[in-house]
């Protein structure tokens, strides 16, 4: 049974302001909550239908989690999914960790990614390819936004996303580390011999990479398109697609 | 000024049933409507704020389009965007063209892609890389769904998406054409010498490639992940991400 206060709390967590106040975020659906339970994230409460409870998803080391049994109708009231799926968890936002010094690893530097689906997909893809770190510009979409958590398919429980002033971050690192950036003009990605590590700057969905960051980019990359834009193909690639192609090329040149 | 009937019609087109009845779809926002105007799609009406009308977006060959001036408040009532952007067009769904015979070109065969954002992104990516054709399994999301049109960023006006019984389609072609499919076990993509053309089967977001299609796949592909799933990385890649990586590898081996 769902109380009015629980309903209000869960719905409020769709907004970053309340997530910051409560230090809580929402993860939904059987698969995602399974991933959450496997992680070492603190879980405050789980709201689940009798079906989920009967299926025995709780691992032994999670015996302290409070489970509230709810009906399908109640689940539909708290869910943001188009097809609510058995369970919704309230989990604790972990304390943010200071960005460790960069020493030869791969870092994705996201210049104000706004779309939660894109950020979630980038986290999932980076996790797949074993990219070490993600640094997002301040003002990027919040990693604990329910759509980011959802699109990450649980990778958000494994990959740290650091928020930083990207200009400052690049200024501190560009002398020691290769900085790659996707721009409309540059060297075609398959022709570049990548270093064994470096920073890849990914531009915002509408505006690409900010002008102020461009001076720090040591290698300008283009992803080769077929034909020319004038002959009529897509003007650009989605930010998460461009990121994935670079991550793939990194692992093609340096198998993990 | 927006009439009640116009409001009702536009809202109804969010559902495939009414799009099929009216043979109309919706495209929204300055950039997408610019792309629509550049295409040879029939446009029934454009609903735009005074700002859009004053900016002179209409090319000369489009003088017959009916433009209805609406207020920002009216735009917000008809828009599905989180930030409605000046203009919404009602355009005609083109008649579906019979799938031409496959002769050595590249074809993406989508096995029931359900997420409109994924289908739109796949169309945009295929357009970028100059992939010739897309065949979607019957029951895939409808290409004229507003979110597909939006995510395609206008590529939907250039790329034909054919709907077909994929099993039949593969049965007709697999003897003459290489059929690639992404599966959890297979040859690592960078190690495969691709043919100059073929069919790439992309699995559904949750269930991958249907069992009944697997016998037609001549080359099983995996996209190399870092480490092993047991050591804890993402279990899979998003369907549009996997598609993009294969399209990139095709163009790396066969520049367009």
Image (cartoon, coloured by chain):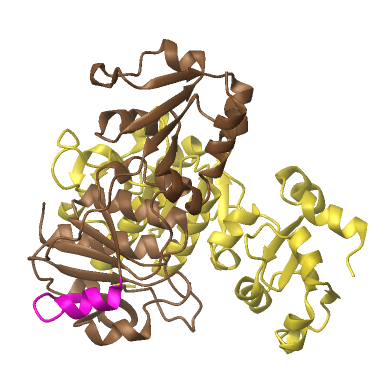
Chain colours: A brown, B yellow
Q: A94 or A117, which is in the foreground?
A: A94
Residue A90 position, x and y percent, is 43, 34
Q: B202 or A51, which is in the foreground?
A: A51
| Residue depicted at 48% across the width and 63% down the height | B124
Residue A166 is inside the magenta segment: yes
Q: Quadrant of the N terminus of chain B?
A: bottom right
| Residue depicted at 36% across the width and 78% down the height | A209
Q: Quadrant of the C terminus of chain B?
A: bottom left
Residue B134 position, x and y percent, is 49, 54
Left-right relation of B45 to A246: right
Residue B209 visible in the shown view:
no
Q: A118 or B102, which is in the foreground?
A: A118
Residue B82 position, x and y percent, is 62, 60
Residue A86 position, x and y percent, is 50, 24
Which range is magenta? A165-179
| Residue depicted at 29% across the width and 84% down the height | A214
Residue A255 lies in quadrant? bottom left
Residue A183 lies in quadrant? bottom left
Q: A210 or A90, which is in the foreground?
A: A90
Residue A5 lies in quadrant? top right
| Residue depicted at 33% across the width and 85% down the height | A212
Residue A227 is inside the magenta segment: no
């Amino acid at each position: 049974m769902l109380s009015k206060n629980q309903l209000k709390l869960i719905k409020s967590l769709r907004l970053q302001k309340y997530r910051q106040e409560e230090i809580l975020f929402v993860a939904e659906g059987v698969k995602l909550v399974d991933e959450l339970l496997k992680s070492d994230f603190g879980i405050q409460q789980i709201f689940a239908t009798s079906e989920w409870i009967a299926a025995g998803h709780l691992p032994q080391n999670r015996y302290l989690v409070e489970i509230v049994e709810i009906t399908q109708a109640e689940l539909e009231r708290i869910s943001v999914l188009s097809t609510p799926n058995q369970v919704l968890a309230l989990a604790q936002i972990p304390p943010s960790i200071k960005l460790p010094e960069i020493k030869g690893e791969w870092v994705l530097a996201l210049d104000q990614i706004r779309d939660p689906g894109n950020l979630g997909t980038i986290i999932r893809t980076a996790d797949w390819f074993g990219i070490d770190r993600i640094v997002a510009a301040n003002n990027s979409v919040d990693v604990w936004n329910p759509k980011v958590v959802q699109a990450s398919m649980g990778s958000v429980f494994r990959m740290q996303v650091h928020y930083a002033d990207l200009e400052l971050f690049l200024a501190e690192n560009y002398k020691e580390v290769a900085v790659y950036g996707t721009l409309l003009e540059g060297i075609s990605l398959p022709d570049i011999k990548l270093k064994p590590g470096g920073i890849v700057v990914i531009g915002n969905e509408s505006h690409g990479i900010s002008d102020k960051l461009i001076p720090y980019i040591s290698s300008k990359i283009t992803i080769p398109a077929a034909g020319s834009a004038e002959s009529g193909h897509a003007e650009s690639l989605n930010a998460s697609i461009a990121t994935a192609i670079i991550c793939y090329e990194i692992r093609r040149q340096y198998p993990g």
